[in-house]
Image: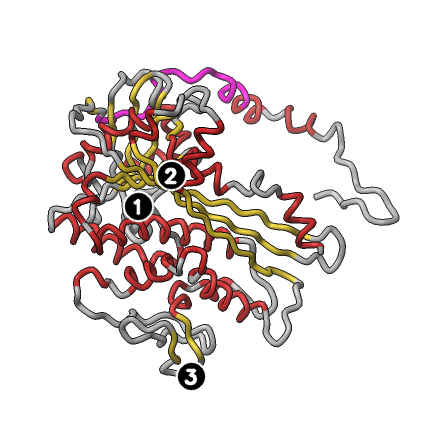
Amino acid sequence: MPYKQGARLPGERASRLGHLDVLKSDLVNKLVEGFEKPYTDDDLPGQINWEPIDANDKPLNIIFGVDGSLVPIEDDTPPYRALAFVKTALLRIDQTALAKIDQESPNPFALKDILTKAALYHATVFPLRNVRIDGTTNYHAIRKIIFDSLKDPTLDGQPYETLKWIAYEKWDNNPKRLPLFECPHCEETLATLDFDADEGNCNNCNGHLYLTDMLGFHQNMIIDAAPNSIASDYMGVHETLLLFTAIRHFWQTNPEILKNCLFVKDGPLSIRAQYSKLVAPIRRFLQFANGNEISINLVGQEKTGAFVDHFDLIGRNVPANSIFIPGNQYIKEKIQHRPNRGAAYGKDTNYGAKIFIKLDEYTRYVLTIPTGKFNENPVQSDILGINKILSTLPKIQSSRYEGGLLPVELAHGIASLSTYPSARILKIFAGE
């Protein structure tokens, strides 16, 4: 690696002739030649079971979309203070409102009217590094910020109530304590809380606990600093809680309405690392609802990543109105390019199955849709609400972006911190 430029002396430049020795290698030249060969259909992976889409159900009428955005702000001068601003948004629209929007050139006033009447958003900020907080440390300040932010009064604390609803599995009227989790004080996995408790004390060290500690954000922090991933992990968890807040509301007031709702999340239906402890109760709820003949129609859309890249590769010559559900072995070997051993893909982190959908030559979707109980090799009949979802997709697709879905597009317009407010404004605010 070259030396970087300092305050007094210039940086080291890479040699302009160093590549010549590399190009003399026969192996390198053969690899370059193979790299330049065009990809053909003979190179495509085999054993892909594309099935025709035969969905004639009535489209779902009430649509929810959720998205989030974050901007890390860092000082350009020592001690390089760092903050992270996070924003999430939940949007509710219906087919009547969607029908009034021109999918190719939407009227901005029509969009504003919809967003004003049917959008909720949440915003918070995390002190990451070299930010002085009187009377406490970054570590404990961020723990309290997470607890207070989920109780955001602008949302009446509903995402926090949803966390309790999921963590304590309140839907089945069978009170449960929290499973044991790592204490943020003694770091022993002996902490828990009684049913419906907000706060408590560790059984081992008597340290003070918040319900949000069970998520495990503290496991990625040290006393005086936290990585940027704390903000992105919080955003992902809050998006999930926002979406399930809408689901919980109907479940507790009129569950029959859920049969006519579609919930769309930007990104896969997954929660990674220590936060994945929410996945098992979410699966149990979806299975419980399905057993009570209440359909929870839930979709996560991936716009980038390995699955999208793979679909670009295999989807070129696939006929329109086709669907493919890859199993565990296919995902590991053809998409992740790793051996098929160990735990099944997504067993601990995903609450939905990956699905490739091609509606026409220009409209492809990589979606995650729940199966309830985990199934490493699902088929169409295992996917919850698949026919209703497939019937609804053509009604909510956007013509502004390839593979765009209007609920995600509109929710992103609210949640985006790149323009609302701009990152420059946030940096000025942080400086002040």
Question: Which one is earlier in the sequence, the residue at label 3 or at label 2?
Answer: 3
In this rendered view, identify the residue nearer to me: 233 or 164: 164
- The residue segment tinted magenta is 32-49
Q: In the rendering, which numbered label is found on residue 345?
A: 1
Q: Are marks 2 and 1 in contact (CB under 8 Å)?
A: yes
Residue at mark 3: 205
Residue that appears at 42% across and 47% down: 120
Q: CA distance from mark 3 to mark 2?
A: 42 Å
Q: Residues within 10 Å of mark 3 (few under 14, many from 20)?
A: some
Left or right position of 88 against 224: left
Q: Is residue 43 magenta?
A: yes
Q: Residue placed farthest to the right in the image?
A: 8
**What secondary structure is marked by label 1?**
loop
In this rendered view, identify the residue nearer to me: 348 or 385: 385
Image location (x, y in percent) of residue 20: 69, 25
Residue that appears at 51% across and 64% down: 145
Q: Are marks 1 and 3 in contact (CB under 8 Å)?
A: no
Residue type of the residue flagged with mark 2: Gln
Q: Is residue 111 magenta?
A: no
In the image, residue 369 above or below residue 372? above
**What secondary structure is marked by label 2?**
loop
Residue that appears at 40% across and 56% down: 273
Q: Residues within 10 Å of mark 2 (few under 14, many from 20)?
A: some
Residue at mark 2: 336
